[in-house]
Image (spheres, helix red, strand yellow):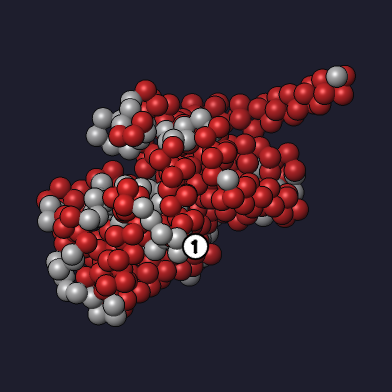
Amino acid sequence: MESSQKQNTGLLQKLVIIYYKYIKPEFLQIFRGFGNLSPFFSKGGRMDKTFFLIVTGLTVFGLATHYSASYENLWQLVFAVIGIFVMLIVAHVNVNVYKELSSAFVALCFLLLIAVLFRTDYNGTHRRLFFFQPSEIAKIAFIMWMAYLIDKYKKNHNSGKQFWAFLIITGVFGVMLILESHLSGAILFMGIGYAMMWYGDMPKRNFAFVTAVIIAVLLIVVWKPTVLLRVPGIHEYQINRILIWKKVLSGGNFTAKERLGDARQILQSLYGIGSGGLLGVGFGQSGQKVNNLSEKANDFIFAVLAEEGGFFIAILMLALFGFLVYKGFKIANNSRTYYGSLLVLGISTQMALQVLLNVAVATSVLPNTGISLPFFSDGGTSMVFSLASMGLVLGVSKDSRGVKDVKSR
């Protein structure tokens, strides 16, 4: 009894130390940030044209695919135009401005994540606040803030306390998304945070321990998915998706109820991808999108793309995203500032993880988690803020090593 009390007291003391050393200073930074802004507009070199062209190409590619999947493209086009406009504005703002305001931005987004819990959507989820999804905005704020924190405490990267403090911060955001019944968002947030901690060169022994725990938990969930029902924010339909996924991988037979219910989306997605072959059935000619894929313009838009364009078009899309992420990592490597480098690494990682998760779900490599494909899937908030995040990368590219000043050209 006494030993357990001592353990609880020791844990409480550690949490208090973490609060006063890492969390409290950031609350104060929210108010300091507005008074410490450096010159608003960036005076660096020209932004990376190749990166800009890739983003523009993916946006056009996504709009065409979205039109084919839904035949309703007007609003998606409007949001794309707004997004490109926002991207160019963001790219021309001094990156230090975002650094100074990152604490205020993440605090605002965290309040939005709390507010959305009081609004219920389809299937008991809490994802939309009026006309937008706070999680889409919070992704950028989280990356900006993590980059700021890692940069600020870079002298203590070998500290175990710092590692656990950053892990707790990442976990808190993950829990917020789980409470929204947004499991894919939680996975994405925690993946981004974990990757950024790795980029921050924190103790590798801690990563080894936490990774082993994560793998063990995942194995338990796959073996017995019903354990997730004990987690607040997890619903029965999410458990059924894991059970269906296991059945697909094992080649099991589905009942008529499953084919028309929980298994319908993934089975129709696989049928669509398989029927596309090498060259596809032709633009606008998808058979699956007519009556079978209810999420044809959203989470399963890759299935429509693969069916109509075939293997080669699907590979082209993946290659473009791969090149985008590669260019992002290259821009991060050439950044003059540690903050700029971490910011671009975080955004590039988010893009890579989101694309991989979406395609993995559509091909049944992973269970259906409901995650959108950037620039392609339906959603104005996603389109605008995906393009805004690309603006941050372009802004960092203007201040990279090896880029000449505009005046010297």
Q: Amino acid at mark 1?
A: Ser
In x, y percent, where is residue 238? Answer: 43, 42
* Vertical position of residue 315 compared to residue 69: above or below: below
Total numbered badges shown on the rendered structure: 1
Badge 1 marks a residue whose secondary structure is: helix
Residue at far right of view: 2
On the image, the x and y values in percent for residue 6 come to: 84, 22
Horizontal and vertical percent position of residue 363: 39, 63
Identity of the residue drawn at 50% across and 53% down = 346
Q: Is residue 257 visible?
A: yes
Residue that numbered label 1 is attached to: 250
- Residue at 16% from the left image edge and 62% from the top image edge: 68
Residue at the bottom extreme of this rendering: 278
The percent position of residue 366, horizontal first and vertical second, equals 46, 57
Question: Which quadrant is the N terminus positioned in?
Answer: top right
Q: Quadrant of the C terminus?
A: bottom left
How many residues crowd around disc 1 within 10 Å: few (fewer than 14), some, or many (20 or more)? few
Residue at image coords 37%, 42%: 136
Give the vertical position of 218 relative to 268 (above or below). above
Residue at horizontal 81 percent and vertical 26 percent from the top: 7
Q: Does residue 18 sit above or below 43 in this rendering?
A: above
Q: Is residue 202 visible?
A: no
Query: Residue 313 sits in which quadrant?
Result: bottom left
Viewer-proximal residue, 83 or 186?
186
Nearer the observer, 96 or 243: 243
